[in-house]
Amino acid sequence: MMTTQLGAPTGDASPTRRFSGRWAGLDLCPMLHESMYSVLSRFAQRNVLDFTTLRSVLALKSIGRRARSFYLASSDIERRMNGLTGWNWRSHEAGVEPVSLVLVESVWSPMLRHCPICLEAGFHSAWYQCEMLACCPVHGCELVTVCQSCGAPTAEYGFSAALFADPYSCGNCGGPIAGVQFDIASHIDLRFAQAQINARLLSVQRWFEEAEKRCGCLAGFTRRESVLPASYTRRLLRYMLFAVHPWPDDPSSEEGITVLTWRVASGGALRPSPDHPSRRREWSQCVQTQGVYRATLRLLRTAIDDELGGVGNDVVLDLASGRVPERPEVHPYVLAYLLLRFVFERTRTWRFNWSSDFVSIPNEPIATGHIGDRLSRRCVRAVVLAAYVGMLSLVRRERARGHLALEAFCVDIDALVYYCIDRYRGADCGFVVFPGVPWLPTRGLRADKLSVLMSYERLVSAKSEVPAIH
């Protein structure tokens, strides 16, 4: 339960309990729904602490970008603030750390997102960082990510000099982010309206509490070493998050997302998912997998040919030189297809002919992907199609940069596909998610949100019912 709990200073003599009563502003304890940024800023302002001094007071060493994030590393700061002040504060950011990576990649704003009127009064709610919340529920004004003094984007939401060089100030211009200086009188007035603020933020709090319970399995999507653009990842995770845990006040859904799902009875005994780094399998050992891979490539090549009105049979991608040839005349659809074959078939050949029907997965773990063994035909087809869309996105990004380096495409299949696979009561089931490509041959696999939710619930149930094998 993510609530702010406050109590009297304790007699605990541990290093984190160093309350001495000398700090100013201890009576202005954290409010319900208040963010870590807000609490630290007010504490620093009342005690005239710049970032370096604040970091020293909190005994925080110089830390990397990930460790600075309030979403991913709040527990230490919370514990040390409680030790300094004698509070018994539980921050909301620390409360959702178990699923914060999913939220960061889907609905948490990467930048400080604020209500200027609230910030003038020295208040910022953790829930203002949720991009689904468009307006301040207290004042009705738009929640923004720009400084009201200079118009520059606000800094990343975390413990850094950009946000705390001077409390409530912009790291770009040095002026107040709210446009006017912090006013203690306004802050006191706002505290008298706590009941109204709490009531209006209650539905948001409940949504996040349920997200913490239900969406932990989606963390598997974010743990993989993806090479896809951040915007690609964000769209997929937002879609999946709202498919399994709908936003209460916004019935709209992300458009242009394709989900392919399957559930196929299997003759094998019930077993845990092979979707685990320690259980890499060789697709090439399964004749069915090889056959479905070839058939899917033929379908894909036909669809590309129809979409482009014909592709010349003389198109060849020769990678023997260790680089991707600069050929602007080759359409991204075609180049993505040939490079997809490179990912699946590398070490077998370095030359890929558009018109050739000869394809072969090498006798080794399939591009070291953690996909699993003896999967159903539908699963193989879905993974190959999703990997193609991922490769197409990667090709477009690398071409926009003006340099097609082969190293950029020496990736695992896992880095191109967002998927969940499991065995459930003797059935192979799962789903893949990717931005929609209208002409892709997905017949028989496409799913709506209800099907995604059902697949997700099956996977969660399977993981809870079957003991893991290590």
Image (tube, rainbow, N blue to C red):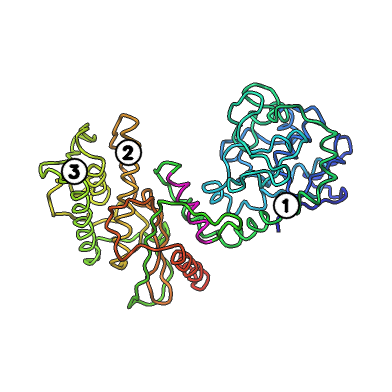
Q: Which residue is mark 1?
A: 200
Q: Position of residue 304 (x, y in %)?
A: 22, 49
Specify the label residue 396 is tagged with.
2
The residue under the point 66% across, 34% down is: 61
Residue most extreme to the front? 140
In the picture, measured across the screen, residue 376 lies left or right of residue 107, that is left
Specify the label residue 350 is tagged with.
3
Q: Amino acid at mark 3?
A: Trp
Specify the label residue 63 is tagged with.
none
Q: Position of residue 332 (x, y in %)?
A: 26, 40
Q: Is residue 42 above or below residue 333?
A: above
Q: Is residue 335 above or below residue 247?
A: above
Numbered range of the magenta stretch: 232-244
Identify the secondary structure beneath mark 1.
Answer: helix
Q: Quadrant of residue 116?
A: top right
Which quarter shows the N terminus? bottom right
Instruction: Estimate how packed mark 2 is, as few (under 14), some (14 to 19) or many (20 or more) residues with alpha carbons within 10 Å.
Output: some
In the picture, measured across the screen, residue 359 lies left or right of residue 196, that is left
Q: Quadrant of residue 50?
A: top right
Identify the secondary structure beneath mark 2.
Answer: helix
Residue toward you, 282 or 441: 441
- Give the Cα separation between the discs numbered 3 and 2: 22 Å
Membership of 22 in magenta stretch: no
Instruction: Estimate how packed mark 3 is, as few (under 14), some (14 to 19) or many (20 or more) residues with alpha carbons within 10 Å.
Output: some
Residue toward you, 200 or 226: 200
Q: Nearer the viewer, mark 1 or mark 3?
A: 1
Q: Amino acid at mark 2?
A: Arg
Q: Amino acid at mark 1?
A: Arg
